[in-house]
Structures are given as C-alpha cells and as structure tokens.
Amino acid sequence: MTVTVENTHAPTSLNLTPSRRAVLDIVKSAGRPMKAYDILSKLQEVIKHAKPPTVYRALDYLVTNHVLHRVNNQNAFMHCQQHVECSKQQEERVSILFSCQLCGAVIENANHSLTAIIKQMTGSLGFKSDADMVECSGVCQDCR
C-alpha cells in the first residue's frame, strides 16, 4: 500500500506495508515515546505472529522517512510532531527534542538560528554530521 502524506509543497509517497502502517498507527496513537518491545506487544494484537525484526524494519523505514523520530535518551520512538517541516527540509534543519526526565514527555521544536550555528560549527570543524536532531533532557513545565 502506498500512502501519500500531503504537505504544503510536494507530496511524499510512503510505501506503507501493513506492518509499517500498524507500527505507525501504534506509535502515533500512543502520544508518547514507545520502546520497540512495547510496540511489538501492541503489534502482536493486530498481527499475531509479528517478531522483533518486523518492528525494527518498520521503525527503520519510518525514521528514515521522517515520520518517526528515535529518542536516544529514552531508547524509544515517537511520531514526528513537525512532519511537514522535517520531510521537506531534511538537509538544512536540525530538530530539538526536549525530553522530560520525570514524566518522559518529549516536545519537538526547531530553531533556524540554532540550526545555522550547528551547521556553521560543523563546517568550521570540517565535520560532516549525520544527525538532524539534538536531544535536550531536563524537567518539563508540568513536572516542575
């Protein structure tokens, strides 16, 4: 199944197999970052014989296509809160994930000034970064 994700410029076509669609729906409906084995547990309610490689392949595809993000400091995955911006500005945009250490909430944001500074710093060091995301952990407003 090919699904078109519309944005304000050009559509991005995703080849969403039933497994990919189910994983996307599970993570999206969670409203919070989910660990791979939690996703697998939910996936097995829909696809009885789903195994870990099924989940990891789906996650890899969805992260590569900027539909999900990997939250490294939680070892979890979340739905991209800014999919339109992430998908159309892949090379020139750095997203920032603010992760609460107490409740686990993650808020995604981007700042053009910070992106420019990071790009300038990596360029001046002759460093080619493969990251399009910075994680910042702390305590959210609700937990303070």
Image (tube, rainbow, N blue to C red):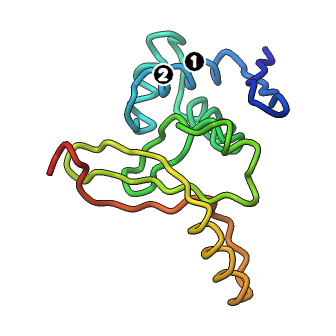
Horizontal relation, residue 45 to residue 7: left or right: left
Check disc 2: other Cα within 10 Å, few if <14, some if 14-19, many if 20+: some
**Residue at 53 percent of width and 37 percent of height:** 81
Residue 122: x and y, percent? 67, 80
**Residue at 59 percent of width and 35 percent of height:** 53
Q: Which residue lies furthest to the bottom in this view?
A: 125
Q: Quadrant of the N terminus?
A: top right
Element class at badge 1: helix
Instruction: Say which residue label 2 marks.
Output: 26
Residue 86: x and y, percent? 67, 45
**Residue at 23 percent of width and 55 percent of height:** 139
Callouts 1 and 2 close, C-beta under 8 Å: yes
**Residue at 73 percent of width and 52 percent of height:** 90
Instruction: Say which residue label 1 marks.
Output: 22
Residue nearest the viewer, comparing 1 with 132: 132
Horizontal relation, residue 46 to residue 33: left or right: right
Amino acid of disc 2:
Ile
Q: Distance between the residues labelled 1 and 2?
A: 6 Å
| Tag of residue 110 | none
Q: Which residue lies furthest to the right in this view?
A: 10
Residue 36: x and y, percent? 45, 37
| Rendered position, 116 above or below 127 | above
Amino acid of disc 1:
Ala
